[in-house]
């Protein structure tokens, strides 16, 4: 694959001032020579130009001028991919960029696959796999905190810690295999104690990394928070207040929202995907039936429930049933319309929630996160109650604090950002931890060094998967297929 020269439009499609077409590969400069005509008496062709220089000229396709461009020549190895790279800056818009790309492809390049430029950077040793994933996180970040976390990982701070862990395990494996090669020499008690201590430090280190998995996943993909409640409780008004603009239609007529509405907001630095759902009640027509069905499907996938109540209305049997239904979810009870005379008090709502939570058999201190159960902070069975007024915005800041406190363990601080692992890292470290624990058990029980070495190799390989020192083509294809074309 690295023998090919690839090309793609590296900027988003659509109208704009400029667009960039990127090339990388062994024949990059030759391809550029075929389609680029420099303007100026002494302007060289791309193949004769010094590295890291910018040149003015035209792109020619089938003998016709396509566009006036600036062409940057970047010679290996001082490039993103460690290959020869050319970046052509043309006028923005769908057609100019497409025609420039067509000229490059006609000149001998092929269209790049999603993430292929970054994949080449990994294969050529410029970055490791954790840093490559950080590139995608950087592009997709939706809050400043997520952006900072991606930059920390791109700088290699997570990779350095993982490599340190892998080196420690490799040293232990070397000691064990040395004693296998020389069976006449028993492991001295003090040496075995040192090996056990090194493995215990490794387990503790993995535990520290695994504790960041939930926060890392929230930063990368956002937290899904469903806004639910009876019709006309103020769900759409709450969504608009949290977003800071009118996104959902607000009407005094119950049942206005027929479909789910999703929007992302920055809540105390965390990306939260709020979903406004159709009011929960017995549907009266086919459209409302479908809206309620979609609401139910959204609730199944949501990691947080904002259960909205009308403080000016009494608690109904339906409200009590929904309190029991959502008792297995992380949730916040929101008393809306607190500017009106209160009929539903906080104590009444608390008593109803506690009674319904006690009758629920589903453990309420767990939520579903990327296929695995992740323990979340907070006391099971006692959801926080927050009073708001969506008409005036009162209580909204307290609600944002409650959301952050419920899903984020402790303060959001800079020390956590460099090591926030993703779900792939989490899976690899779980396997490494299990194998390391088995190694400890074998050594302490004196069950044979061959078995200890086998388990330790599993641990080393699993840790290596995080940074790509142990990998497969299928894994690489899965990771880089999620990138955008041109990156």
Image (cartoon, grey):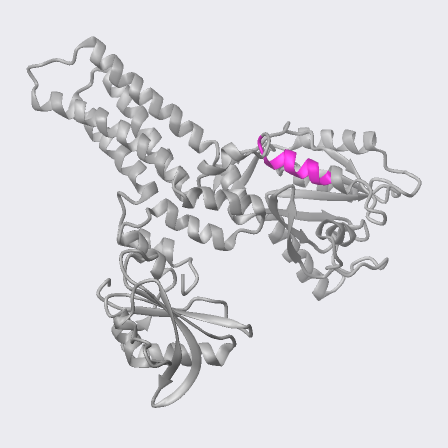
Q: Which residue extends farthest bottom?
A: 63
Q: Residue at x 64, y 37 (%)?
A: 404
Q: Which residues are magenta?
A: 399-409
Q: Residue at x 67, y 41 (%)?
A: 325
- The answer to whether residue 482 is left or right of residue 306 is left
Q: Is residue 262 above or below residue 457?
A: below
Task: Pick the residue in front: 91 or 185.
Answer: 91
The image position of residue 416, as x and y in percent, is: 50, 34
- The answer to whether residue 280 is left or right of residue 124 is right
Task: Pick the residue in front: 433 or 45.
Answer: 45
Queried whether the magenta region covers residue 151, the answer comes back as: no
Q: Residue at x 83, y 40 (%)?
A: 315
Q: Is residue 363 above or below residue 58?
A: above
- The answer to whether residue 198 is left or right of residue 11 is left
Magenta segment, principal secondary structure?
A: helix
The image position of residue 77, as x and y in percent, is: 27, 56
Q: Residue at x 37, y 45 (%)?
A: 130
Q: Is residue 323 visible?
A: no
The image position of residue 218, as x and y in percent, is: 54, 43
Q: Is residue 103 above or below residue 243?
A: below
Queried whether the magenta region covers residue 402, the answer comes back as: yes
């Amino acid at each position: 694959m690295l023998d090919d020269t690839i090309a793609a439009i590296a900027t988003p499609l659509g109208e704009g001032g400029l667009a960039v077409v990127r090339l990388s590969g062994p024949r990059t400069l030759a391809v550029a020579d075929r389609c680029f005509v420099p303007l100026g008496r002494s302007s060289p062709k791309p193949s004769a130009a010094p590295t890291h220089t910018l040149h003015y000229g035209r792109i020619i396709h089938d003998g016709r001028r396509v566009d006036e461009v600036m062409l940057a020549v970047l010679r290996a190895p001082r490039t993103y991919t460690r290959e020869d790279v050319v970046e052509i800056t043309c006028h923005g818009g769908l057609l100019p960029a497409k025609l420039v790309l067509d000229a490059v492809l006609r000149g001998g390049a092929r269209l790049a696959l999603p993430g292929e430029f970054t994949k080449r950077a990994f294969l050529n040793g410029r970055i490791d796999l954790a840093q490559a994933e950080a590139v995608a996180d950087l592009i997709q970040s939706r809050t400043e905190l997520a952006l900072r976390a991606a930059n920390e990982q791109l700088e290699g701070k997570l990779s350095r810690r993982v490599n340190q862990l892998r080196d420690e395990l490799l040293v232990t494996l070397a000691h064990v295999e040395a004693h296998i090669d020389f069976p006449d020499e028993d492991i001295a008690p003090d040496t075995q104690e040192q090996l056990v201590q090194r493995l215990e430090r490794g387990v503790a280190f993995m535990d520290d990394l695994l504790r960041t998995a939930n926060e890392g996943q929230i930063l990368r993909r956002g937290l899904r928070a469903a806004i639910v409640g009876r019709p006309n409780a103020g769900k759409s008004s709450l969504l608009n207040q949290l977003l800071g603009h009118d996104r959902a239609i607000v009407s005094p007529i119950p049942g206005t929202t027929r479909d789910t509405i999703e929007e992302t907001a920055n809540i105390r630095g965390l990306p939260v995907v709020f979903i406004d759902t159709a009011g929960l009640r017995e549907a009266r027509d086919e459209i409302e039936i479908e809206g309620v069905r979609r609401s139910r499907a959204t609730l199944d996938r949501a990691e947080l429930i904002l259960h909205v109540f009308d403080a000016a209305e009494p608690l109904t049997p339906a409200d009590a049933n929904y309190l029991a239904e959502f008792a297995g979810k992380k949730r916040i009870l929101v008393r809306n319309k607190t500017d009106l005379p209160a009929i539903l008090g906080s104590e009444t709502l608390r008593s109803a929630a506690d009674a319904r939570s006690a009758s629920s058999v589903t453990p309420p201190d767990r939520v579903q996160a990327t296929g695995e159960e992740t323990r979340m902070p907070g006391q099971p069975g006692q959801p926080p109650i927050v009073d708001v007024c969506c008409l005036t915005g009162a209580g909204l800041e307290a609600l944002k604090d409650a959301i952050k406190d419920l899903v984020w363990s402790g303060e959001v601080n800079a020390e956590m950002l460099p090591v926030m692992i993703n779900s792939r890292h989490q899976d690899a470290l779980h396997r490494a931890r299990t194998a390391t624990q088995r190694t400890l058990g074998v050594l302490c029980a004196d069950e044979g060094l061959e078995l200890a070495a086998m388990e330790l190799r599993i641990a080393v390989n699993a840790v290596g998967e995080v940074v790509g020192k142990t990998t497969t083509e299928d894994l690489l294809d899965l990771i880089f297929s999620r990138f955008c074309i041109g990156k």
